[in-house]
Image (spheres, grey):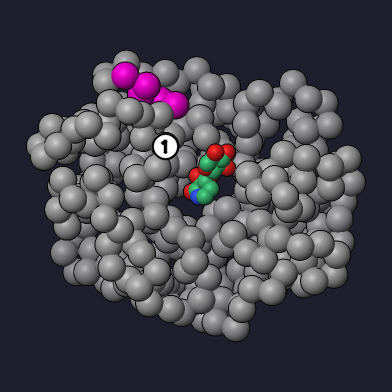
Amino acid sequence: AETLGDAAAQSGRYFGAAVVPELLNDTNYVTTLDREFNAIVAENVMKWDATEPSRGQFNFSAGDQLVEHARSRGMLVRGHTLVWHAQQPGWVQGLSGNDLRQAMIDHINGVAGHWSGDIYAWDVVNEAFEWDGTRRQSNLQQQLGQGWIEEAFHAARAADPNAKLCYNDYSIDGINLKSTAIYNMVIDFQARGVPIDCVGIQSHLSWDSDLSSYQANLQRFADLGIDVEITELDVGGSGSAQAAVYQQVTEACLAVARCTGITTWGITDQHTWRPNDTPLLFDANYQKKPAYHAVLAAL
Ligand code: XIL
């Protein structure tokens, strides 16, 4: 195959990118997106601050633009993200107790309900654990208590019964305290009938990241009967060292039957959330980097 999307599709997988709607007017950006990728995720515009800037007032226009772009080209859409401690609108940060609980449920109903049927998989909850496996002491955790994650998953299932429901986090690229806590949460959810279909491994990596247990970690989640997805892949560095990390991640996903797809957190080094780095597959001039060729060959 000649493109990332076509190569991934040969094994029934997708290859996606995080996208910002403003750049869909940029010819190089949209040409590369449409040629190479068969899935997208909103880098920002489906987050709580973007979709519900004031309570009960939803703004779906930017997200609709991405969904329409994807729909007309047969791309999958990942939903990112319903509930997160970051990028909350100011009004949420002032809420307490059951008022925050109701706001969270209403937000999930509003957003997942609006895009019901359009989303392949939702990152229902993002980044709720610390490196040592304890819960992050966010406003959600402090105000709502331990049950808030499963409440979010139940609400998401009701709002969009067809989307896969994922828990998504970073620094869970190997077997460690944090990924094990999430692994145990999945087992607990399954035992108690809390809906969960997938775990998203963000994979914000570096050229010297330790990937020695990367594949084994994907496999242990898959062995629970859920999917794993590489949801926000980018790799600091350049050249062959960067390419080698991209290759290892791709090979690990391909080796795990329930690793259903890979998303890079952007397209080009021109537009990345890691501004002092060159972490993506296309350089600032949209030329294919060594990392691109490594991924394509591994798919
Ligand atoms: C980042 C975006 O890329 C930035 O544009 C924004 O300013 C902050 O958020 N983990 C996540 C993503 O789940 O939502 C984050 O995206 C990157 C880290």
Q: Amino acid at mark 1?
A: Gln
User: Is 52 part of what is drawn in magenta?
Assistant: yes
Start and end of the magenta stretch? 50-54
Does the segment drawn in magenta span residue 262?
A: no
Task: Say whether residue 281 is left or right of residue 79.
Answer: right
**Relative horizontal placement of residue 2, taking residue 65 as reference (left or right):** right
x and y percentages locating residue 49 in the rendered image: 40, 29
Residue ID for mark 1:
87
Q: Residues within 10 Å of mark 1 (few under 14, many from 20)?
A: few
Does ligand 1 reach within 8 Å of label 1's beta carbon?
yes
Q: Residue 169: horizontal and vertical position, in percent?
A: 44, 58
Relative vertical location of residue 222 with respect to residue 262 in this rendering, above or below: below
Q: Which residue is at the front of the view, 190 or 293? A: 293
State which quadrant residue 103 falls in. Answer: top left
- The local secondary structure at tag 1 comes to loop
Residue 206 in the image: state x and y as whole percent: 67, 66
Q: Specify the quadrant of the image occupied by residue 195.
A: bottom left
User: Between residues 180 and 218, which one lies in front from this camera angle?
Assistant: 180
Residue located at (33% from left, 37% from top): 160
The answer to whether residue 14 is seen in the rendering is no
